[in-house]
Each structure stands twice: as C-alpha cells, then as structure tokens.
Image (cartoon, rainbow, N blue to C red):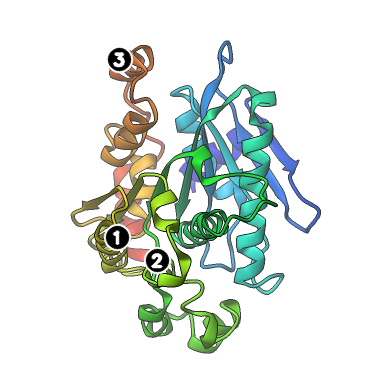
Amino acid sequence: MPGFLKVAYYYFFSSQIRRSIVYGDQPRNRLDLYLPKNLDEPKPVVAFVTGGAWIIGYKAWGCLLGQQLAERDIIVACIDYRNFPQGTIGDMVTDASQGISFICNNIAEYGGDPNRIYLMGQSAGAHISACVLLDQAIREAKGEESISWSVSQIKTYFGLSGGYNLCKLVDHFNNRGLYRSLFLSIMEGEESLQLYSPGVRIEDPSIGNAVSLLPPIILFHGTADYSIPSFSSKDFAAALKRLGAQTELILFDGKTHTDLFLQDPLRGGKDEMFDHLVAVIHAGDEEALAKDASAPPRKRLVPEVLLRMARHISPF
C-alpha cells in the first residue's frame, strides 16, 4: 500500500501523463501516455499491454513501468482493452491492435519517434500482444491491403511472463483458480484454443512466411512463476528459433510472476530486467546510453519487510 499510494499520486497528478486518450469507438478503447520531461527531439516509444488474467486488466497497471521508463527518456503508451465479460479474447486482440495502430500513426504528435516503436506485454497482456503481432504478420504474409499498421514498424517485441500455448495451460489455470469453464468462455471455446495460442499457430504451414516478418522477440520469465510457469516462454522461444525467428529467452532464477513487474521496481536500486529493456531500446544511441550509465539508482518505494510479506500473501 505505501508504494501503491505513491504511484497512484503520480498517476492522477503528474503533468507528464496524458490519461485516457481515445483510440477507438468501443468501451475502454483508451490509452495513457507517459511522457519524458524533455521532448526536444523524438523519443522511442513502448506500446504496453497490461496483464490481469483477461478479467481485471487495466491501463493504470502500467503506471510504475511508465514512470520509470519516462525517466529514461522513453515514451510509454499503456493500452486499455475490453476484459471479460465485457468482451472475449477476440475483442481483446482487436482492441489491442487498434491501440497499436493509433500509436504507430499518431505518436509523432506527442513527441514520439514513429521509427522507434517497441511492443511489450505482461502476463495476459503478453499473450494478447503476441496474438496481435502474429495476426498482423499473417495478414501481411497473405498480402492483405486493408491494414492500418505493419509489423515492420515494431522494432522489438518484449514478452514478460506470458502464456503462449493455451492448450498446455488450461489444466494449470484450473488448478490455480481460473476454472476451466470460465477460461474457455474467455477464449471462445475449446475449439479456439489453438487459434489464440501463438506457440501453436506459428507451426501451422498455412500461415506462409508470417514468422519471417516478425520483429526480434525477447521473452522474460521468472523460474519461480507459479501463475504461468516458465516452460511457456521456453517452449515459445524454442519454436520461434526453430522456425528462424530472431529470439532471445531471458530467465530470472527464483523470480515469481509479480517479482519482475511489481516487487523489483518497488524495491528500487538495480533491476536486471529493466536495465536490459532500456539497453535494447537505446541501442545505437550513444548519448542515451551514456545518460543511462550515469542515471541515479531508482528509489525504493516500499520497505523490504513489506515486499517479503507481500510475496508470500500474493495469490499470483
């Protein structure tokens, strides 16, 4: 709570946030922009799709990431989308794709560099954004002309603690409390599990050369993740590599589902995943890399004893 209150104050009162920008005509078609203080030149952009078990996702969940990346001169766009029961997985994928399209076509108006856009998703958001990316690649491989953005506009995809083969996760989720009947309702029935499993779909010969169109992919996962086990990222990375996609898998020993996204950022100090993320985004920009090297350590927002307590209490 002490950390959340600080982040909430920043979210509601910071002049660096543009909240609830409309990107579509459906409910919750909104996004938040986190802007660096200095916008004297176009900045790299991270389009971020938050997690929330496809049920409790919300754009404000990306506030801490947005704040900390903005401090490194990176714009973050947190995309909201319809959750279940307001929508099912098809609606979520459609919404996220529309949000990405808005960013690709309009971010220059907010100081972003349209040639340096990165896509990132966490947990359910990693699954949704991976579906979006593969769907777009398949459409382009088939030569569809009615597209409003292109996978070539995405410099790198970052998947954090994501689930990419739903067929292997149904029973696991059921045992964790996301019951099979509910999960299948979210995913539009058992017959749709393969369609919304990027790890399965990339193996389908009918998608043509879609995998070759994908941007570089970096998957992050904690080995102590019990919400979505790390085999999900391992299997997806192995399949992508086997098909020739440029893929990197980074595992964090002993990290849980929320450590990488929540506890570690609240802890402050050095953060291996955050540092890797920034290094990839700023690659080739010597001035930005020099600033990163001399940046002060991130501030601790929560006492360690509370973080350790939360780690044991958290259902994730």
* Contact check, label 2 and label 1, Cβ < 8 Å: yes
Visible residue check, residue 51: no
Give the residue drawn at x 69%, y 33%: 106
How packed mark 1 is, by other alpha carbons closer than 10 Å (few <14, some 14-19, many 20 or more), is some
Q: How far apart are marks 3 and 1 (CA)?
A: 39 Å
Relative to 297, is 116 on the left or the right?
Answer: right
Query: In the image, what residue occupies the spot 35% across and 37% down?
Result: 277
Tag 2: residue type? Ile
Task: Nearest to the eye among marks 2 and 3: give it.
Answer: 2
**Given this view, does label 3 or label 1 mark the residue nearer the observer?**
1
Badge 3 element: loop
Q: Mark 3 points at which residue?
A: 294
Check the image and name the residue furthest to the right. Answer: 25
In the rendered image, residue 123, in percent from the top left (x then y), is placed at: 44, 60
What residue appears at the point 41 percent right and 68 percent down from the top-left corner?
Answer: 315
* Residue 167 position (above or below residue 40): below
The image shows residue 171, relative to residue 246, as above or below, that is below
Mark 3 or mark 1, earlier in chain: 1
The foreground one among 256 and 183 is 183
- Report the Cα–Cα distance between label 2 and label 1: 8 Å
Instruction: State the residue in front, 36 or 296.
Output: 36
Label located before the other in sequence (2 or 3): 2
- Indicate the position of residue 287 as horizontal and vertical percent values: 36, 11
Query: Which residue was labeled with disc 1?
Result: 243
For label 2, the residue is: 202
Q: Mark 1: which secondary structure? A: loop
